[in-house]
Image: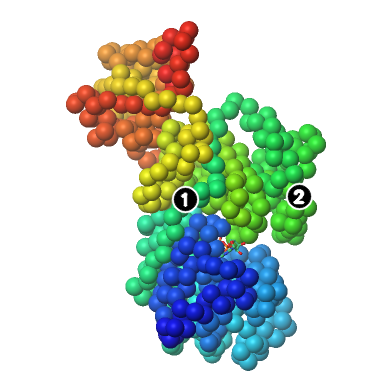
C-alpha cells in the first residue's frame, strides 16, 4: 500500500510525463487510486474507454514489477514497442520469443530493468515459468480481457482458469486488477470468483458511446447497400464483419471488381498473412478490412469511421465489442448491422453444429434471441444495448436509426389482441412461423394435420403476408410482450404484458411508418 498523498498526486504526473495526456477520463483516476491503495479491482469499460492506462500508470508507480496477462500475442509486440517509445521499460514473454531472448529478458527482470512484463496466459501452464515469476518482486497483476475466464462470456480461454491459482502462489500476494469491455452480471461474477479476487471494488463505466450512430438496416440487396455505403465513406477507415471465411473472400472479390481495395482477415489464413493485413489496415495502407470475428480483439486503431456487420453476430456482447472498434478517437462514427431473417438461421445452425452441451446451447440461443430483438426493436438502439448490459440509462441517443427515423407512434392494440389470442389458442406450443401461418390462414399440410384450421383465429390477419405477420410477432418479442423458449425450435409464449393486453384491455402502441393519405391504414401498419 502506498502513502495517500502519493496516491493522489503521482498518477497525474505519470500520465502527463509518459503518456502526454493532461487529464484522466471518467473512472480512470479513481480506479488507479484504488489499485495503488492495495485493493483488487474489476474494471468494466467500453472498448476505447482507456483501460490500458488504468494498469500502466500504477505499474510505473509501484516499486516492483507488474505482470500484464493478455491473450493477444499478436499485439504484445506493438503494445510493448509503444510503451518503450514513451520511455516505459516494458517487455513481453510469449511463444514468439526465442530462447536466447527469453534468457536475456529473464536476467533483466531479475535485475529490475523492467517495470512491466506482458505474458500470454498459456505460459502460466508451465511450472518452471511460475517458479521464475515467484522469484521476482511482483506488486501488481493486471488481467486484460478478463471475460475470457468465463465459460458464459463470448471468448472463453481455458488457460485463463489457471490465473486464479497463480495469484495465490505469490507471497506477498500482489494487487490484482481485472479489465474487460463487456461483462454481463454473470461474467463479472465469474471473473471475481475465478481470479479469487479479495472483495474487489468494481468500476463500471457506462456502456454508452455517444459518438456512435447505430443502425439496423433491412435490405433485400446487401451488396448494393454495402457498395453505396463504402462509396460514401471513400478514403475513411472501416471494418466489415462477416459470419464466415467464405463471405470474407467473396465480398473482397466483389469490392475488387468494383474498383475498391480491401484487406482480408480470417482464421483460415496463415499467421503471417493475417499479421500483414492487420498491419496494413492499422497503418492506413488499406482503408477497409473485411474480417470474421477472429479480427479485432485489442486492436487500438483510433480512426475507424465505421463498422458494418454484413450478417448478424451471435450475441449482443460480440456485437458491441466489434461495433465498439469504431470511433475510439471520440469522433462521430457509424455502426451498421445488415439484417435478414436468413442470417438468424445461419447462427442457429452454427449453435446446433457446435460441440456444446444442451445447457450451453440453450444459453447461446437466448444470447442470439437478444441479438434478434435488437434488430426488431423500434426503441433507441443505444438504450437497448446499455439496458441489456444492466446499465439503467434511460435517455435516447437521438442518432440511431430508430431515433432518427420518421416513425410515429400508433395504437396497435387490435393487431396485438389478434396475435396474442391466436398464441393462447395454440396453447403456446408452436413457433413464430406456424403462428404466422395460422393468422394468415395458410392451407399447408402441417396446419391441416394439426387441426389448426378450426381455430377462431385462423385467417384473422389474411390481408397481410406471412412474412409481415412474422415480423410483427418478432417485434412483440423484442418489446417483451412475447417470450420464446430456448432451443432449436423455440415456441412463442405470452408474457405478463401480453396477458394484461388480453385480460385488462391494456393498450399497445408501436412506432410505425407514417401513413400516406391515399393508402389503406392496415397495409402501412408495419
Ligand atoms: P481500451 O479500453 O479499449 O483498452 P485503450 O486503453 O486502448 O482502450 O485506450 C483507447 C485510446 O484512448 C488510446 O488511444 C489511449 O491512448 C486513449 N486514452 C486513454 N486514456 C486517455 C486519457 N486520459 N486522455 C486522452 N486519451 C486517452
> Callout 1: few (<14), some (14-19), or many (20+) C-alpha neighbours within 10 Å?
some
Can see residue 514?
yes
Can you give x and y, in whole percent of width and height, for residue 165 in the image?
44, 77
Residue topped by disc 2: 286
Horizontal relation, residue 186 to residue 339: left or right = left
Residue topped by disc 1: 208
User: In front: 3, or 297?
Assistant: 3
Q: Is residue 396 above or below residue 161?
A: above
Residue at 38% x, 52% y is 391
Of callouts 2 and 1, the N-terminal one: 1
Can you give x and y, in whole percent of width and height, for residue 521 in the image?
41, 12
Horizontal relation, residue 242 to residue 366: left or right = right
Query: Could you say which quadrant of the image residue 456 lies in?
Result: top left
Horizontal relation, residue 232 to residue 521: left or right = right
| Residue at far left of view | 504
Residue at 51% x, 38% y is 400
Residue at 44% x, 59% y is 205
Nearer the observer: mark 2 or 1; the answer is 1
> Callout 2: few (<14), some (14-19), or many (20+) C-alpha neighbours within 10 Å?
many
Amino acid at each position: 500500500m502506498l502513502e495517500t498523498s502519493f496516491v493522489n498526486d503521482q498518477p497525474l504526473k505519470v500520465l502527463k510525463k509518459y503518456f502526454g495526456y493532461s487529464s484522466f477520463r471518467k473512472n480512470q483516476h479513481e480506479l488507479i487510486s484504488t489499485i495503488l491503495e492495495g485493493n483488487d479491482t474489476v474494471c468494466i469499460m467500453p472498448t476505447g474507454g482507456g483501460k490500458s492506462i488504468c494498469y500502466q500508470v500504477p505499474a510505473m508507480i509501484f516499486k516492483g514489477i507488474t505482470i500484464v496477462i493478455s491473450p493477444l500475442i499478436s499485439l504484445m509486440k506493438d503494445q510493448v514497442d509503444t510503451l518503450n517509445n514513451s520511455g516505459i521499460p516494458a517487455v513481453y514473454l510469449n511463444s514468439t520469443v526465442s530462447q536466447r531472448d527469453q534468457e536475456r529478458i529473464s536476467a533483466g527482470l531479475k535485475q529490475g530493468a523492467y517495470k512491466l512484463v506482458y505474458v500470454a496466459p498459456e505460459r502460466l501452464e508451465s511450472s518452471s515459468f511460475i517458479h521464475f515469476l515467484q522469484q521476482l518482486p511482483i506488486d501488481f497483476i493486471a488481467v486484460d480481457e478478463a471475460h475470457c475466464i468465463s465459460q458464459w462470456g463470448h471468448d472463453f480461454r481455458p488457460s485463463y482458469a489457471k490465473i486464479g491459482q497463480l495469484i495465490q502462489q505469490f507471497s506477498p500476494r500482489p494487487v490484482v486488477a481485472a479489465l474487460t469491455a463487456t461483462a454481463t452480471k454473470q461474467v463479472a461474477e465469474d471473473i471475481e470468483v475465478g481470479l479469487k479476487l479479495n472483495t474487489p471494488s468494481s468500476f463500471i463505466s457506462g456502456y454508452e458511446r455517444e459518438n456512435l450512430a447505430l443502425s439496423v438496416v433491412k435490405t433485400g440487396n446487401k451488396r448494393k447497400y454495402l457498395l453505396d455505403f463504402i462509396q460514401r465513406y471513400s478514403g475513411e477507415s472501416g471494418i466489415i464483419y462477416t459470419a464466415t471465411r467464405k463471405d470474407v473472400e467473396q465480398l473482397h472479390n466483389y469490392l475488387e471488381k468494383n474498383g475498391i481495395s480491401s484487406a482480408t482477415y480470417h482464421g483460415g489464413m496463415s499467421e503471417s498473412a493475417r499479421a500483414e493485413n492487420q498491419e496494413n489496415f492499422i497503418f492506413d495502407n488499406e482503408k477497409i478490412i473485411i474480417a470474421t470475428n477472429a479480427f479485432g480483439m485489442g486492436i487500438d486503431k483510433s480512426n475507424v469511421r465505421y463498422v458494418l456487420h454484413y450478417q448478424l453476430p451471435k450475441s449482443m456482447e460480440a456485437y458491441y465489442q466489434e461495433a465498439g472498434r469504431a470511433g475510439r478517437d471520440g469522433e462521430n462514427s457509424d455502426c451498421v448491422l445488415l439484417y435478414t431473417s436468413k442470417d438468424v438461421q445461419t447462427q442457429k445452425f452454427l449453435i446446433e453444429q457446435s460441440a456444446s452441451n444442451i445447457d450451453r446451447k440453450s444459453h447461446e440461443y437466448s444470447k442470439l434471441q437478444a441479438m434478434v430483438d435488437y434488430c426488431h426493436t423500434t426503441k433507441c438502439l443505444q438504450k437497448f444495448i446499455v439496458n441489456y448490459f444492466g446499465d439503467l440509462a434511460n435517455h435516447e441517443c437521438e442518432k440511431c436509426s430508430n431515433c432518427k427515423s420518421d416513425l410515429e407512434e400508433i395504437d396497435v392494440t387490435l393487431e396485438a389482441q389478434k396475435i396474442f389470442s391466436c398464441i393462447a389458442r395454440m396453447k403456446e406450443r408452436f413457433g413464430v412461423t406456424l403462428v404466422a401461418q395460422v393468422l394468415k390462414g395458410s392451407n399447408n399440410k402441417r396446419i391441416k394435420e394439426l387441426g389448426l384450421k378450426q381455430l377462431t383465429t385462423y385467417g384473422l390477419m389474411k390481408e397481410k403476408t406471412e412474412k409481415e405477420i412474422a415480423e410483427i410477432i418478432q417485434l412483440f418479442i423484442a418489446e417483451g410482450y412475447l417470450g420464446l423458449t430456448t432451443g432449436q425450435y423455440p415456441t412463442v409464449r405470452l408474457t405478463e404484458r401480453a396477458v394484461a393486453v388480453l385480460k385488462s384491455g391494456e393498450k399497445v402502441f408501436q412506432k410505425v411508418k407514417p401513413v400516406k393519405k391515399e393508402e389503406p391504414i392496415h397495409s402501412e401498419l408495419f
